[in-house]
Amino acid sequence: MEAPTAVTQAELLERGDAICAEVNAAVGTVGASTETGGAAEQAAGLYSGMVDSLKGIGVPQESEGYPEFIAAAEALATAEDEVQLASEREDTASLESAESNASSALASFQTAADEYGFEDCSEGPSAPVSPGTGPESGETGSEAPEEPEAEAEEPEVEAAPEPAPETGGAGGAPEGGGTTGGGGESGSTGGGESGGIGPG
């Protein structure tokens, strides 16, 4: 039942950091929203579960530094169990002592995690930061309506060159002059015919 799974150091670091990141976020949330006694008890439970999860990943093939890390993790779990027990008993004096021990154990665990190569496991809990939505909504609405007005002036410039090709029509004048000459011919023929009828 105790046969550990063999993993690489890279797999251990990746999976271990993911576990620690979740626990750090959860502990940060607990600390921000719960009374002191309840927060200590919940944080203790989270840290104990974290250590169990880390041990459950498996033993790395590159074992250098891993025994020290696991020893620090187990010491943290033991210290957090004492915090949880003292909190359940509402034993204030024991709780203060247990929390002090747990704080030291957590610092040792983070140091060991950092030396082994962990990132999230070497950091403390972080409270979640809620993004502020107020400033963004006031800025985006005022600039948008001004853009379409600037584009309306551009088409007027394109109409100017169009009348230029129509000014070169030089062939229209001779056509009008040729029609006037035909009128004179019709007048002279009519006059000759009337003069020939008279003497008969």
Image (cartoon, rainbow, N blue to C red):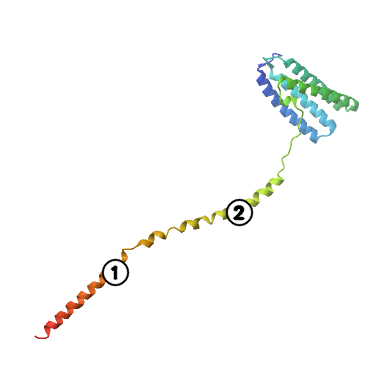
The amino acid type of the residue labelled 2 equals Glu
Question: Of residues 12 and 95, which is closer to you in this image?
Answer: 12
Relative height, residue 169 to residue 44 (above, below)? below
| SS type, badge 1 | helix
| Left or right: 60 in relation to 177 | right
Along the viewing direction, whichever of 135 and 39 lies nearer the viewer: 135
- The residues bearing labels 2 and 1 have C-alpha atoms spaced at a distance of 58 Å
Q: Identify the element where label 2 is drawn.
A: helix
In what quadrant of the picture does the C terminus appear? bottom left
Which residue is found at the position 80% from the left and 33% from the top?
Answer: 31
- Picture quarter containing residue 111? top right
Please give the label number shown on residue 146: 2
Image-quadrant location for residue 103: top right
On screen, residue 187 above or below 16: below
Q: Which residue is mark 1?
A: 176
Mark closer to the observer (2, 1): 1
Quadrant of the drawing holding the N terminus:
top right
Inspect this view and state whether residue 150 appears: yes
Residue 104 in the image: state x and y as whole percent. Answer: 83, 23
**Residue at 72% from the left image edge and 16% from the top image edge:** 66
- Callout 2 crowding tier (Cα within 10 Å): few <14, some 14–19, many ≥20: few
